[in-house]
């Protein structure tokens, strides 16, 4: 008689992951690939920039800030999509929509401002903003509005992004 695997005994939860599934394995493969691919410019520009000098280093770090601003805006967009979906379903009040859409717009504004200030300010501002978005995303996962794997993905990517931004800043 064949033995039953642990995956047979523990069906997927509402979030799509299994309780005994490892942290990284719970993330859908496409999300892993696209997420980690999106982290490559952070690592490349921060480490590569350290080996450059003068104008080349400034350009690498400005490109890092610009890319960070774009990705921070993307994270805000995730919340915009969540907010309009639940509002359109009629399950939340206008107050929720104001807060959620505010959370979704602020990252774009911070990213844009990071482009306008010197790199010595823009890099740590972005790092702090990515940390803040991680906390917001983890709270959203905890409340059941995002699947658990999304929180796992955000932790992994945020560590890479924040470390890269701080490395370039130092």
Image (cartoon, grey):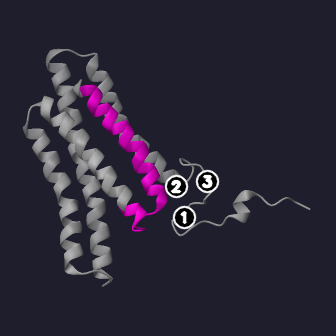
Camera-nearest residue between 120 and 45: 120
Mark earlier in primary sequence (1, 2):
1
Q: Could you tell me residue 106's position as x and y percent?
A: 17, 56
On residue 16, the disc is 1
Measured Cα–Cα span from mark 2 to mark 3: 12 Å
In terms of secondary structure, where does tag 1 sit?
A: loop
How busy is the neighbourhood of tag 3: few (under 14 within 10 Å), some, or many (20 plus)?
Answer: some
In terms of secondary structure, where does tag 2 sit?
A: loop
- The answer to whether residue 134 is seen in the rendering is yes
Extreme residue toward the right, this view: 1
Q: Are the two marked residues, 1 and 2, in contact with CB atoms closer than 8 angstroms?
A: yes
Q: Which residues are magenta?
A: 140-168
On residue 21, the disc is 3
- The answer to whether residue 71 is seen in the rendering is no
Q: Residue at horizontal 32%, vertical 32%?
A: 164
Q: Which residue is mark 2?
A: 28
Q: Could you tell me residue 56's position as x and y percent?
A: 18, 20
Q: Residue at horizontal 28%, vertical 71%?
A: 83
């Amino acid at each position: 008689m064949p033995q039953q695997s642990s995956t047979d005994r523990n069906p997927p939860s509402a979030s799509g992951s299994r309780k005994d599934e490892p942290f990284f394995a719970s993330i859908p493969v496409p999300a892993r690939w696209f997420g980690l691919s999106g982290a490559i410019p952070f690592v490349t520009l921060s480490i590569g920039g350290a080996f450059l000098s003068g104008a080349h280093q400034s350009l690498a770090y400005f490109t890092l800030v610009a890319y960070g601003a774009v990705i921070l805006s993307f994270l805000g967009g995730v919340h915009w999509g969540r907010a309009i979906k639940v509002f359109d379903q009629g399950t939340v009040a206008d107050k929720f929509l104001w807060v959620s859409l505010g959370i979704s717009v602020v990252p774009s504004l911070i990213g844009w401002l990071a482009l306008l200030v010197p790199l010595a300010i823009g890099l740590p501002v972005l790092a702090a903003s990515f940390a803040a978005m991680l906390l917001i995303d983890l709270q959203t996962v905890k409340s059941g509005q995002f699947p658990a794997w999304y929180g796992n993905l955000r932790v992994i990517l945020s560590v890479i992004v924040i470390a890269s931004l701080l490395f370039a800043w130092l």
